Image (tube, rainbow, N blue to C red):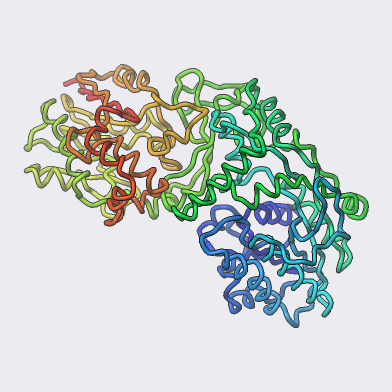
């Protein structure tokens, strides 16, 4: 079977290209920069080559015995600190790929170009004959223009290349999508205003379909514009509001005011070295209001795009229910309530908060009966915990301060140094070792994903105290873990349970609770009411409850709000926030000093706890 190579396979378009090729039963080889990212997105049977457009050797290895190539890799960003990167990736990277393919008897080379290689008049219609020969004014467009010309020269030398020119692609993606962020921000009323102008749009899955049609039907040297329609931002906002069931549509920023704002943001971004909210090149593109025609693709390839309203609906379905329909029932893992007609308002999307998952988004569902939150994306526990950053924690100042707070709770309820204690879900044994430092000699730990502690205590083992702290939310079977822990508590002994709850979580603004939601590791977060009912359900006595997180202390730098703000300052990259140099960010963000000292009085989350006593 012929091998089809896809570059940029984990990108926005590349992902959908691969999915279509796999559905067609094709033998696919992927060229990716991140093996971990590819393994999360695609089946393990898919052949993956780790490489880079700057590395000709890796390109030659990936190109061995291929018959068809889809070149979708590139740098799509419109702003980087060093604009020369566009030239290196988009132009020189394409050059390197063509070098690697020299001498190959390819059946087809499908090159994903851009609409910006064409010229047009203000608000004018353009087709495949309107090639722009003069250099483009912005670095991204210029790099794609040069890359397009390089592929054309290769075509003249015999490469069976066909050119795809998509307009602004929108739609779903399991890791990153500007449109998903736009929808979620729109729903959460985080978009104060829409810009003037508009842009030509096309649904990303339709572009993938157009690429495959071009491979099958497109003659070498032909160009195909893939566009559904031009849409003003005001009209786009109206359609999105209708699909979300919202009455309020953000107002449209006048062009003169928009230009002032964009110019100001451009100046600030050069000073702060951070990307502006709207790139200058993008804003100019919006104002140009070009209207590309896809009649040629529709006529010669049989290509038919979906309407924008339908594309929005498809994307919303993806956000809330993956690839299934709203009408499919959802069962709560906690109270077992089955919602046969789940409402869109009970679904949301949230970013992961570790380095591995910070660019990923995970689907959260809220049970309308018990109000618990649960991740509805299936995961492999062995996979997500193989490099879990919290299993590498060290006993730093923050850890010691918060563990002292936790120990104070336990000792205030009767814990003594002679007691036998089990830290259930102990991670790397941080709290267990802390207890030993404080004179506790009969302390054990259990964690199925950490080698030194993976052996579960034998059935019938009797502990005076079992500590389930920051543990039960990591399990799909909430009650089952509690029952299992109680079986290890001797009659008259105690079980401590501490866990996040659903207070302060707004389904329309999950981004505000990224630290607490801690995706994809927190599988089920119960309401504080449900946590209080745990004792009654298990037939044990609840002797004490706590409302605040054990992370909340009056010591400077040791409170939940400071932790939350520190993680935000590091882009919700937990590994970066745990690094030795993490504290230096305070020098750039003075407000962190305020939260370090007074964050206790401004909590951003609650983590209730209960102490249960087993009948003697």
Instruction: Look at the image and tell me whether residue 60 can be seen.
Output: yes
Q: Quadrant of residue 31?
A: bottom right
271 or 561, nearer to the observer: 271
Q: Quadrant of the N terminus?
A: bottom right
Which residue occupies 23% across, 19% down?
A: 542
Q: Quadrant of the C terminus?
A: top left
363 or 275, nearer to the observer: 275
Whole-percent x, y for residue 571 in the image: 42, 47
Instruction: Look at the image and tell me whether residue 486 can be seen.
Output: no
Whole-percent x, y for residue 255 in the image: 67, 39
308 or 105, nearer to the observer: 308
Number of numbered callouts drawn: 0
Whole-percent x, y for residue 566 in the image: 33, 44
In this rendering, the answer to whether 543 lies above or below 505 is above
Q: Quadrant of residue 325?
A: top right
Q: Residue furthest bottom?
A: 103
Whole-percent x, y for residue 318 in the image: 64, 37
Tell me: 108 left or right of 271. Answer: right
Which residue occupies 11% across, 30% down?
A: 411
Which residue occupies 92% across, 55% down?
A: 300
Q: Quadrant of residue 319?
A: top right
In this rendering, the answer to whether 109 lies above or below 514 is below
């Amino acid at each position: 079977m012929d091998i089809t190579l896809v570059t940029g396979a984990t990108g926005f378009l590349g992902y959908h290209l691969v999915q279509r090729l796999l559905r067609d039963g094709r033998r696919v080889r992927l060229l990716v920069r991140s093996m971990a990212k590819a393994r999360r997105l695609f089946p393990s049977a898919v052949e993956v080559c780790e490489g880079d457009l700057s590395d000709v050797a890796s390109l030659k290895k990936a190109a061995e015995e291929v018959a068809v190539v889809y070149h979708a890799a590139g740098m799509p960003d419109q702003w980087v600190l060093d604009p020369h990167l566009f030239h290196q990736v988009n132009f020189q990277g394409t050059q390197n790929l063509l070098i690697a393919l020299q001498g190959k008897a390819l059946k087809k080379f499908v090159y994903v170009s851009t609409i910006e290689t064409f010229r047009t008049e203000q608000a004018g219609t353009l087709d495949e004959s309107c090639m722009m020969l003069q250099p483009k004014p912005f670095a991204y467009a210029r790099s794609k223009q040069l890359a397009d010309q390089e592929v054309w020269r290769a075509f003249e030398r015999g490469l069976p290349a066909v050119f795809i020119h998509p307009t602004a692609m929108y739609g779903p993606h399991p890791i990153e999508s500007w449109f998903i962020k736009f929808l979620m921000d729109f729903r959460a009323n985080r978009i104060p205003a829409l810009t003037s102008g508009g842009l030509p749009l096309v649904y990303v899955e339709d572009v993938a379909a157009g690429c495959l049609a071009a491979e099958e039907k497109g003659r070498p040297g032909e160009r195909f514009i893939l566009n559904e329609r031009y849409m003003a931002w005001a009209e786009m906002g109206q359609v999105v509001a209708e699909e979300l069931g919202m009455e309020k549509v953000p107002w449209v920023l006048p062009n003169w005011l928009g230009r002032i704002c964009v110019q100001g943001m451009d100046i600030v971004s050069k000073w702060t070295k951070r990307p502006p909210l709207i790139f200058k090149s993008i804003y100019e593109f919006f104002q140009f209001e070009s209207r590309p025609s896809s009649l040629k693709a529709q006529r010669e390839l049989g290509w038919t795009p979906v309407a924008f309203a339908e594309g929005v609906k498809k994307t919303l379905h993806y956000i809330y229910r993956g690839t299934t329909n709203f009408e499919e029932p959802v069962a709560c893992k906690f109270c077992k309530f089955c919602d046969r007609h789940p409402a869109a308002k009970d679904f949301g999307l949230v970013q992961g908060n570790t380095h591995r998952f910070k660019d990923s988004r995970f689907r959260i569902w809220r049970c309308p009966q018990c109000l618990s939150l649960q991740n509805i994306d299936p995961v492999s526990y062995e996979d997500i915990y193989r490099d879990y950053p919290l299993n590498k924690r060290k006993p730093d100042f923050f850890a010691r301060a918060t563990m002292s707070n936790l120990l104070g709770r336990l000792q205030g309820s009767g814990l003594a140094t002679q007691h036998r204690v089990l830290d259930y879900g102990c991670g790397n044994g941080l709290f267990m070792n802390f207890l030993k430092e404080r004179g506790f000699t009969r302390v054990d730990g259990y964690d199925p994903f950490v080698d030194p502690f993976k052996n579960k205590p034998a059935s019938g083992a009797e502990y005076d105290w079992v500590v389930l702290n920051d543990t039960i939310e990591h399990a799909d079977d909430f009650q089952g873990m509690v029952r299992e822990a109680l079986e290890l508590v001797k009659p008259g002994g105690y079980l401590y349970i501490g866990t996040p709850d659903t207070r302060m979580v707004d389904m329309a603004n999950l981004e505000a609770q990224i630290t607490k939601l801690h995706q994809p590791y927190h599988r089920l977060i119960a309401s504080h009411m449900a946590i209080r009912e745990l004792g009654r359900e298990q037939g044990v006595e609840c002797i004490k409850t706590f409302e605040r997180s054990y992370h909340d202390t009056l010591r400077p730098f040791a409170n939940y709000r400071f932790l939350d703000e520190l993680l935000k300052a590091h882009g919700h990259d937990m590994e970066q926030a745990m690094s030795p140099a993490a504290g230096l960010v305070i020098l750039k963000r003075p407000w962190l000093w305020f939260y370090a000292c007074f964050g206790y009085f401004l909590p951003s989350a609650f983590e209730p706890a209960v102490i249960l006593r087993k009948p003697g």
